[in-house]
């Protein structure tokens, strides 16, 4: 069966410009016109798009040697480094993802809750009694510092994080359309990316050298990577350790920043939920540091984060390169094509999520659980074998940040339109997003009483 193809587009470029301008609108229009599966030309490449949970299931369940993320995400290789993640065969990638897991287990997560709480408190202590901040920028900075502190350690955060943040910002330039098609072309953004990475490796190598001379007081993620061994007994080189740290920070930082920003924006736009989230905070033991267990009791806040994930997934589409012909419902997609699923499109299907354009966190509550009725319907963190390993960390971080902000401040959004900005790969709210704050008095008592 042939796959309907979106007509129009420019010679060779195909639909690249429209797609680049607003991929979600573009893909939604494709779906409206052709239904659950269609294709379009993009810069010399055919892209097949699957938009429904059944198609998502086929995509996420396909083996790596048929649908390859490695081939689709080659633009990350100069960012993460040689011999890391999308530069290695699938078996080695599995081993490397395995090295990240100890950093995401409960015992470590317990310490992160406190670190993130302290970090957020420290940042907010710098604010006046009342004023305005740019929310997206604030979340971006805070999550870089949280990532530095949780993954590379308190000492690194204290001494080096400002320099790290600058280099990391340079590294992020590697996510651009030119790099997607050829990451080695020396355009200014790619050169900046390379300078950023070189500096990050230098900073991390310094940490590794120090650790070898004098181990840290408590074992952390850097120690875990230093102690890790491949199946053949080989240790990771300094460059690989730096690469793995960059992978974990890169995968989780910007994505968490924008999901956190959207969680707050949507909450502040819906006072009835804001009130419920504030009321729920009385479940937290007063005057005690946040713990994994206390954060788990914040069920309404969790549903509000899920609703932000549904309405504004930070990664609006996921891709694979087809290595062997891929058949879905009688449609054959040939090797050499790209195939794509789109969380931002699936999450707005009315037969999957009732009244999908409405903010309704209760859809995830008992009795409804709309995300559980159909497999692979909520895919903001992907699915199947390559599902995000950091979703627990991300939810915990967002819960902690908003718990601190709501405990300390009365908050209001400046009037304006809050819409997605598609100019970056990780899609956040268009800036500026001005947040007005007024410090609460006797914050703990108020949080307890509310
Ligand atoms: C709100 C925050 C986050 C979002 C929205 C997010 C989203 C995603 C998505 C959609 C995928 C699947 C990619 C694909 O199949 O092509 C993924 C994979 C991954 N994520 Fe996350 N992520 C977040 C936070 C994190 C954090 C905090 C970490 C690490 C500490 C992390 C580490 C990873 C890794 C290593 C993978 C690759 C897994 C594999 O290929 O087996 N992510 N993430």
Image: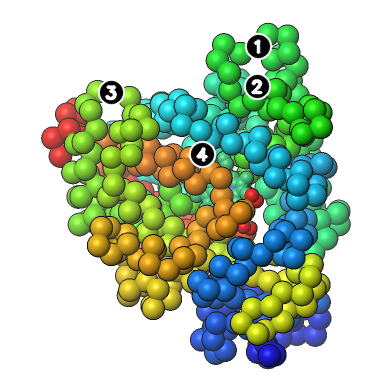
Residue at left offset 33%, top offset 24%: 289
Mark 4, residue position: 143
Q: Do labels 1 and 2 touch, CB within 8 Å?
A: yes
Q: Who comes first in sequence, dot 4 or dot 1?
A: 4
User: Which residue is the site of mark 2?
Assistant: 223
Element class at badge 3: loop
- The Cα–Cα distance between marks 3 and 1, rounded to whole angstroms, is 30 Å
Image location (x, y in percent) of residue 4: 65, 89
Task: Name the residue: 73% across, 9% down.
Answer: 213
Task: Tell me if 240 is positioned left or right of 394 in this view.
Answer: right
Q: Which residue lies furthest to the right in this view?
A: 185
N-terminal-most mark, 3 or 2: 2
The label on residue 147 is: none
The location of residue 153, given as percent across then percent down, is 58, 23
- Residue bearing the label numbered 3: 288
Is 360 placed above or below 332 here? above
Q: Distance between the residues labelled 3 and 2?
A: 29 Å
Position in image of residue 117 (x %, y %): 39, 30
Res 269 quadrant in image: bottom left
Name which residue lies at 70% across and 61% down: 63
Does residue 408 appear to the left or right of 430 in the view shown?
left
Image-based side of 195 in relation to 138, left or right = right
Task: Give the mark, 3 or 4, whose residue is nearer the N terminus.
Answer: 4
């Amino acid at each position: 069966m042939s796959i309907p193809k979106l007509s129009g587009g420019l010679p060779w470029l195909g639909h690249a410009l429209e797609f680049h301008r607003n991929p979600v609108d573009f893909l939604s229009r494709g779906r409206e016109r052709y239904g659950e599966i269609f294709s379009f030309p993009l810069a010399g490449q055919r892209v097949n798009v699957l938009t429904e949970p059944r198609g998502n299931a086929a995509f996420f369940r396909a083996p790596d040697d048929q649908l390859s993320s490695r081939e689709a995400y080659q633009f990350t290789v100069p960012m993460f480094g040689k011999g890391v993640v999308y530069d290695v065969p699938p078996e080695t990638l599995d081993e490397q993802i395995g090295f990240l897991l100890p950093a995401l287990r409960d015992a470590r997560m317990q310490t992160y809750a406190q670190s993130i709480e302290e970090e957020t408190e420290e940042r907010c202590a710098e604010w006046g009694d009342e004023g305005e901040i740019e929310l997206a920028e604030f979340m971006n900075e805070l999550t870089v510092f949280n990532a530095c502190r949780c993954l590379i350690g308190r000492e690194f955060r204290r001494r080096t994080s400002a320099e790290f943040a600058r280099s990391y910002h340079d590294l992020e330039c590697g996510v651009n359309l030119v790099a997607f098609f050829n990451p080695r072309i020396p355009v200014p953004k790619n050169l900046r990316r390379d300078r950023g990475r070189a500096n990050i490796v230098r900073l991390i190598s310094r940490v590794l050298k120090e650790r070898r001379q004098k181990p840290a007081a408590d074992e952390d993620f850097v120690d875990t990577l230093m102690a890790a061994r491949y199946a053949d007994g080989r240790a990771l080189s300094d460059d690989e350790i730096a690469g793995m740290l960059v992978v974990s920070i890169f995968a989780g930082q910007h994505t968490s920043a924008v999901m956190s920003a959207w969680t707050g924006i949507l909450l502040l736009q819906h006072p009835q939920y804001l009130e419920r989230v504030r009321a729920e905070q009385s479940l937290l033991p007063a005057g005690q540091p946040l713990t994994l267990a206390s954060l788990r009791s914040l069920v309404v806040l969790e549903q509000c984060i899920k609703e932000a994930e549904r309405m504004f997934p930070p990664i609006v589409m996921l891709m694979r390169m087809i290595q062997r012909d891929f058949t879905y419902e009688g449609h054959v997609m040939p090797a050499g094509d790209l195939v794509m699923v789109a969380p931002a499109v699936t999450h707005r299907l009315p037969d999957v999520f009732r009244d999908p354009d409405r903010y309704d966190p209760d859809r995830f509550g008992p009795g409804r659980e709309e995300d559980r009725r159909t497999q692979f319907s909520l895919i903001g963190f992907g699915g199947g074998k390559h599902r995000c390993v950091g979703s627990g960390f991300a939810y915990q971080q967002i819960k902690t940040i908003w718990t601190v902000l709501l405990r300390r401040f009365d908050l209001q959004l400046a009037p304006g339109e809050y819409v997605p900005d598609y100019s970056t790969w990780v899609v956040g709210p268009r800036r500026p997003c001005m947040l007005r704050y007024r410090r609460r008095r006797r914050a703990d008592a108020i949080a307890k009483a509310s």
